[in-house]
Amino acid sequence: MRLREPFEVSTGISHDRRVLLVALHAEGITGWGECVAGETPAYSYETTDTAWSILTDLILPRVAGAVMESSSDLLPVFEGIRGHPMARAAVEMAAWDLEAKAVGCSLASLVGGVRDSVPVGVSIGLQPTDEALHRKVADYLEEGYERIKVKIKPGRDVRMLQGLRERFPDVPLMADANSAYSLEDLPRLKELDALGLTMIEQPLAHDDYLDHARLQAEIETPICLDESIRSVRDASLALEIGACRIINIKPGRVGGLSSAKAIHDLCVEHDMPVWCGGMLESGIGRAHNVALASLPGFTLPGDISASRRYWTEDIVTPEFVLDGGTVSVPSGPGIGVEVREDLLDAWAVRQADF
Ligand code: NPG
């Protein structure tokens, strides 16, 4: 799927998303899941192609024909597969959708959601100039987004954010570094404290919990971890050593909705705010994110923008739309949106059946 505009972060630029979908069929019902892996191993070691391989060689042959009551019955299927949470999540989330549809309830209510709409923000990629960034921010505020996240990297950080803060003094603002810094950048990162950011997301390396804890002890801006949190164990480690004050939960990054829920529950228990991130998903992954974000601990706006922020045409109907800084949680069975199989047929480049 071609993005309406390219999305640039500190690790590279995306023009398209190669969307890998899983459809699970049982008793005349279809459950849908989406793999959030990128085209290259820049955000995570997983890619669309590694996920395709893990899914088609290992996971799906074990799923086909199996008798399962709920998504938790998938656990034995994943035995012997270390890592690859994005590949696993695609199947796990499809199973949740299938289960909700079989029971006749919405996915949101099956996962324990309590809201009928969720607060959302917009994530803006690196822009060529400060003027271009200011224009983008003004346009999104005009559209109704109430929280702005901007990507930063060395050379496009303190000065850029100062300018943005001067121009938009009251807007909830956060910065996402996608691991572009090290502790040597401490003086520069300290300068951000003057800007009243709600958080700085993933400033340091994806596997560096200790330095995040050291950094958090030195700066006032809350650190939010994203890439570092792949499981409830990672979240528990981050909590214990003080590596962050906020966690970004993406079900597609942490192995699915059960793991996402477990991280949510742990964070609620420890009074740590969470929010739902995004991976430029199609409407299928977005529907899962919206359902998750309806849980009570998701108190901060998510990176769950309207379909048209990403796509000229989404593969679900109705598309997700922005309504007063929120997105509605679908109330129909399962993910609550219909998959446009006409578009899937037209756009699919590869398919495997089990
Ligand atoms: O709105 O879905 C969205 C994009 C949110 O910024 C966003 N995602 O690091 O959180 C991230 C980032 C990302 C996007 C990372 C694409 C990798 C690829």
Image (cartoon, grey):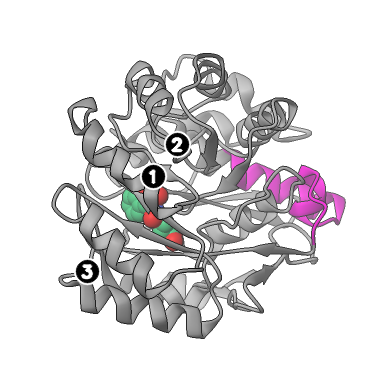
Q: Earlier in the sequence, mark 2 or mark 3?
A: 3
The residue sitting at 16% across, 47% down in the picture is 154
Kind of element beneath mark 3 = loop
Q: Amino acid at mark 1?
A: Asp
Tell me the magenta residue range: 92-115
Neighbourhood count class around disc 3 (C-alpha, 10 Å): few under 14, some 14–19, many 20 upward: some
**Would residue 71 be found to the left or right of residue 20 on screen?**
right
Give the x, y percent position of residue 193: 39, 44
For image coordinates 47% across by 54% down, the residue present is: 278
Q: Type of residue at label 3?
A: Gln
User: Against 342, is 12 above or below?
Assistant: above
Q: Is residue 110 magenta?
A: yes
Cα distance, mark 2 to mark 1? Answer: 6 Å
Q: Is residue 287 visible?
A: yes
Q: Is residue 20 visible?
A: no
**Do the residues bearing badges 2 and 1 touch, measured as CB atoms within 8 Å?**
yes
Mark 1 CB near ligand 1 (8 Å cut): no
Residue pointed to by mark 1 = 193
Which element type, helix, strand or loop, lies under badge 2?
loop
Callout 2: 10 Å neighbours few (<14), some, many (20+)? some
What mark, if any, has residue 220 been given in the picture? 2
183 and 310: which one is in front? 183
Residue at 64% x, 58% y: name it: 290
- Which element is circle 1 on? helix
Residue 27 horizontal/vertical position (percent): 76, 50
Query: Is 190 drawn above or below residue 337 in the view shown?
Result: above
Of residues 221 and 12, the one nearer the viewer is: 221
Q: Amino acid at mark 2?
A: Glu
Farthest residue to the front: give it: 194
First-in-chain label (1 vs 3): 3
Residue 127 is labelled as 3
Q: Earlier in the sequence, mark 2 or mark 1?
A: 1
